[in-house]
Image: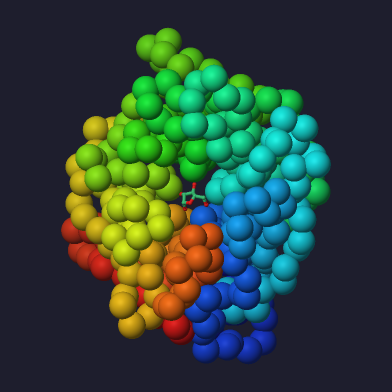
């Protein structure tokens, strides 16, 4: 794929170019959208977000153009994850050696004594069906106070797979075994490192590399409130340290509330998109969130410019 709308259609060899997708990009309550590109197709894997009790099923959405989306219902359900007794949410999905891996948070653990954490499921196709990979969470403890949720899986240029995760204002990074069946020690023998990028950090970690720099993005503010927002920092290594640059996505009182928990698409022609959730104006139901996409741009110094949320 290359850029959104017209350019995407050209790169995929399709005939005509639609103007642009409307926001939200598909109907339904869907939060924490994880965007991916697999085999010239865009994918979004969101949390099913009508109500916490219903977060036992993941749907996925695919598109050739970021405009027309096909729903793939029930790509992963808690029936395929015997240890996930309660909700599952906030996917991270990657391809590795021809298989697709779906990381998720499950059971909403609040303490070290409860069972839950970050799980991983595997499938032969992006649309699943995914099945639990190791029969238990990959990370199931709080360690330094980082709630084991909101994982993001990042492959560095040297082929090392990292998982960054953490809610409750702490973020950790771990190194994953190549087949994703375990967390393995880092070079210094430690199993995790805290990399909380800034005091404002709350949840929703994401990392990408651009021009040799590591961009660490996250959500800050209250996840149900008006101050929920996406901010970012820049560092020279995936383990930091990071320098907070600032907020780049937040609500617009005229468009939608609570914009956050995002992911990013980088296309081969160097276009960038931010995929995030937000709350419709006038609906205060806690879990009612919808998925939207905006362009994301950089200035000449490599700083991300503020994103304007739109209905377009
Ligand atoms: O969807 C459940 C929670 O809401 C996620 O873990 C947070 O990031 C927030 O988006």
How many marks overall?
0
Q: Position of residue 295 (x, y in %)?
A: 40, 72
Point 26% across, 68% down: residue = 306
Q: Where is residue 20 in the image (x, y as percent from the top left)?
A: 51, 84
Point 42% across, 72% down: residue = 294
Along the viewing direction, whichever of 168 and 244 lies nearer the viewer? 168
Q: Position of residue 227 (x, y in %)?
A: 29, 60
Point 43% across, 78% down: residue = 282
Q: Assign the N terminus to one quadrant of the image.
A: bottom right
Residue that lies at the very extreme toward the top in this rendered image: 189
| Residue 108 in which image quadrant | top right
Above or below, comparing residue 236 to residue 222 in the picture: above
Above or below, comparing residue 283 to residue 230 in the picture: below
Above or below, comparing residue 44 to residue 161 in the picture: below
197 sits left or right of 208 in the view: left
Q: Where is residue 235 in the image (x, y as percent from the top left)?
A: 26, 40
Point 52% across, 83% down: residue = 22
Q: How is the image coloured?
A: rainbow
71 sits left or right of 211 in the view: right
Along the viewing direction, whichever of 15 and 282 lies nearer the viewer? 282
Q: Is residue 94 visible?
A: no
128 sits left or right of 69 in the view: right
Along the viewing direction, whichever of 151 and 202 lies nearer the viewer? 202
Q: Can residue 144 be seen in this view?
A: yes
């Amino acid at each position: 794929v290359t850029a959104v709308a017209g350019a995407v259609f050209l790169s995929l060899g399709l005939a005509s170019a639609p103007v642009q997708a409307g926001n939200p990009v598909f109907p339904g309550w869907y939060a924490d959208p994880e965007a991916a590109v697999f085999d010239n197709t865009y994918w979004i894997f969101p949390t099913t977000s009508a109500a916490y009790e219903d977060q036992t099923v993941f749907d996925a959405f695919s598109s050739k153009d970021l405009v027309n989306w096909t729903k793939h219902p029930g790509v992963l359900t808690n029936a395929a994850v015997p240890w996930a007794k309660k909700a599952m949410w906030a996917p991270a999905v990657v391809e590795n050696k021809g298989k697709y891996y779906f990381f998720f948070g499950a059971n909403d653990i609040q303490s070290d004594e409860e069972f839950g954490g970050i799980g991983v499921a595997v499938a032969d196709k992006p649309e699943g069906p995914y099945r639990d990979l190791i029969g238990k969470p990959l990370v199931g403890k709080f360690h330094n106070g980082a709630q084991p949720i909101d994982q993001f899986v990042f492959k560095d240029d040297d082929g090392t797979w990292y998982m960054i995760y953490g809610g409750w204002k702490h973020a950790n990074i771990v190194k994953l075994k190549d087949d994703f069946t375990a967390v393995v020690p880092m070079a210094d023998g430690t199993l995790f490192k805290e990399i909380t990028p800034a005091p404002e950090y709350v949840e929703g970690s994401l990392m990408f590399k651009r021009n040799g720099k590591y961009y660490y993005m996250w959500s800050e503010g209250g996840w149900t409130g008006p101050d929920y927002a996406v901010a970012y920092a820049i560092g020279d290594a995936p383990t930091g340290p990071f320098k907070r640059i600032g907020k780049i996505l937040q609500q617009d009182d005229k468009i939608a509330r609570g914009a956050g928990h995002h992911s990013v698409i980088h296309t081969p022609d160097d276009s960038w998109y931010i995929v995030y959730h937000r709350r419709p104006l006038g609906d205060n139901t806690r879990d009612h969130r919808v998925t939207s996409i905006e362009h994301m741009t950089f200035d000449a110094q490599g700083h991300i410019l503020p994103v304007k949320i739109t209905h377009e």
